[in-house]
Image (spheres, rainbow, N blue to C red):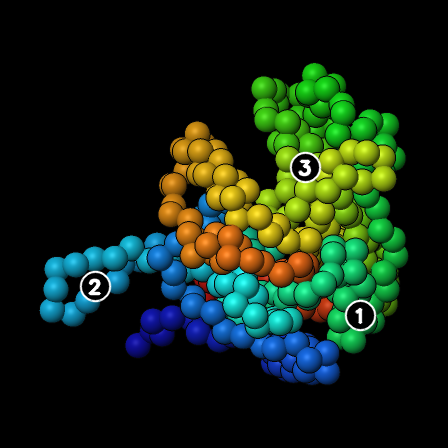
Amino acid sequence: MPELYSDWKPSASFAELRRRGELLREIRNYFHAERVLEVETPMLSSAATVDPHIDSFKTDFCPIGTQNRQSMYLHTSPEFPMKRLLAAGSGDIYYLGRVFRNGEVGGHHNPEFTLLEWYRLGSDHHALMDDVSALLAALTDFLEVERYSYQQLFEQYFSINPHTVSDHELEYLIHDKVDVSLQSLARNDYLDLLFSTVIEPELGVGGDDRLEGVYVYDFPASMSALSRIITNGNGQQVAARFELFINGIELANGYHELADGEEQDERFMNHQAVRKALGNPVYPYDQRMVSSLKSGFPDCAGVAMGLDRLHMLMAQTKQIADVLAFDFARA
């Protein structure tokens, strides 16, 4: 009788599964030594992401014996409940576990993946870069190569200031460097395309026997997401955030966290408007998290790091299936 499923075996080798187990243990050892508390957060939430470029999985909670249905969403990040914990007085915390993003599947993506996210009180995004480098050095052969401001890279690659350049000049660069057919895009889309197509593949490339990292910080204020907006040394308003790249791959994304609940409320509503304009589902956002900011939020910085991507870099593979026991195709 023919076998019903021929792909029942794991997609990762047992050597990589052992490496993964050791990686998880060493992460917990690092934070235990640093006296950072591990926390768990709900995977199901009544609120969802409002990020224009991320989609949530939606399901229904159906109480037994009733006809009621309550829409619930698998979390795309533990960030919102973690911020509620911080506002309640948790101190430094970290989360290590699964998150879910609908529609994201491919060489570098799996719809469910492992995320490490942590928050340090009294830190800004520059201090958190030090922490990220210290963690990676404790986990693997890692070397921090350089830190560049977003502006420095655009001046180096395109001879423009990304904060002041005209949209017309950005469109010209897109036609010259990316795709001549692209036009009438939003300003951030122009910048993102130039960065991801031309700059990003060159960042942190060159390490043969070790991982070499490059940090990019002080993004345009319009890309602030959940970070504060600050004035840099040139008098330019920028987003107080960073991204870490290794071998041309974004590994971590960190913020000096926004602590203004009113501003966060406004940003969430703006994001919902963008989602609606793009024709994407408009989800309810986390009002409880906004309330926690309004109640008094501590000065802190937070960062999220994709553990599967780190494992891929350590294993020198471009396929996420190689580091997962069972990838999406075998789930």
For residue 221, which numbered disc appears in the image? 3
Q: Residue at x 38, y 70 (%)?
A: 5
| Amino acid at pointer 3 | Ala
Identify whether 41 is placed above or below 175: below
N-terminal of the pair, mark 3 or mark 1, is 1
> Which label sits in the foreground, 2 or 3?
3
Q: Is residue 193 above or below residue 171?
A: below
Q: Please name whichever residue, 44 or 199, is drawn nearer the observer in this view of the structure.
A: 44
- Split into 4 quadrants, where in the image is the C terminus? bottom left
- 237 relative to 99 in the view: left or right: right
The local secondary structure at tag 1 comes to helix
Who is closer to the viewer here, 250 or 83? 83
From the top left corner, tell me how far across and down residue 26 is, in percent. 70, 80
Give the labeled residue for mark 1: 134
Can you give x and y, in whole percent of width and height, for residue 176 in the image? 75, 23
Residue sitting at 78 percent across and 33 percent down?
236
Q: Quadrant of residue 45?
A: bottom left
Q: Residue 281: horizontal and vertical position, in percent?
A: 38, 41
* Dot placed on the residue nearer the N-terminal end, 2 or 1: 2
Residue nearest the viewer, comparing 171 with 237: 237
Tag of residue 62: 2
Mark 2 and mark 3 lie on one chain; the one further toward the N terminus is 2
- Does residue 237 appear left or right of residue 275 in this picture? right
Outermost front residue: 295
Q: For the residue carrying disc 3, how many other residues have a C-alpha within 10 Å: few (<14), some (14-19), or many (20+)? A: some
The kind of residue tagged 2 is Cys
Q: Which label sits in the foreground, 3 or 1?
A: 3
Kind of residue sitting beneath label 1: Ala
